[in-house]
Amino acid sequence: MMSIGVWNIRGLNKAVKQKEVIDVIKDNNLGICAVVETHVNCLNLKNVCCRTFGNWDWISNNSSCEVSTRIIVGWDAKLFEIMVISQSKQVIHCCVKFIDSGYSMFLSFIYAASIYIERRVLWEDLKKFSITVKNEAWCL
């Protein structure tokens, strides 16, 4: 059975942090791994993700961030199909299909702002996305 994990890594630019993520993926048999609070500069994003996720596919919310990437999601494309539905600097909303079973569900990977006023934007985003989800499985 494959697992899904999310980890607040607090910076992913250093090789030692990338190694920690690689070890967590292997030790926990993860098929999807999201890392938040990554602080990866967009110029370094591809290199960091290739080293960290190897031959996995990955996405980030760097296009929604002013300074550096906040959320990166990597997955084994032999096991999952992931379609990004929307993203912001605080969340990436996806539809995930388990290839073996055909089962699909929604996943929202969140790294909320520390300032409560900015989190209000996240709450509004989640309320709007719940309309898309309706009665389907949704994990945040």
Image (spheres, rainbow, N blue to C red):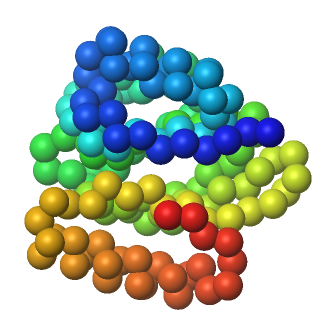
| Picture coordinates of residue 101, whole percent (x, y) | 88, 53
Q: Which quarter of the figure has residue 135? A: bottom right
Residue drawn 69% across and 48% down?
81
Q: Which quarter of the figure has residue 114? A: bottom left
- Would you say residue 50 is visible in this rendering? no
Residue drawn 27% across and 42% down?
37
| Picture coordinates of residue 122, whole percent (x, y) | 29, 72
| Residue at far right of view | 101
Q: Is residue 91 above or below residue 131?
A: above
Residue drawn 28% across and 50% down?
63
Residue 98 in the figure: left or right of residue 59 = right
| Picture coordinates of residue 80, whole percent (x, y) | 71, 45
- Would you say residue 120 is visible in this rendering? yes
Give whichever of 10, 38 is nearer the camera: 10
Residue 27 in the figure: left or right of residue 6 = right
| Picture coordinates of residue 77, whole percent (x, y) | 68, 36
Give whichever of 14, 8 is nearer the camera: 8
Count of number-bearing discs: 0
| Residue at far front of view | 27
Q: Is residue 107 above or below residue 122?
A: above
Residue drawn 32% across and 78% down?
123
Q: Quadrant of the N terminus?
A: top right
Give whichever of 114, 75 is nearer the camera: 114
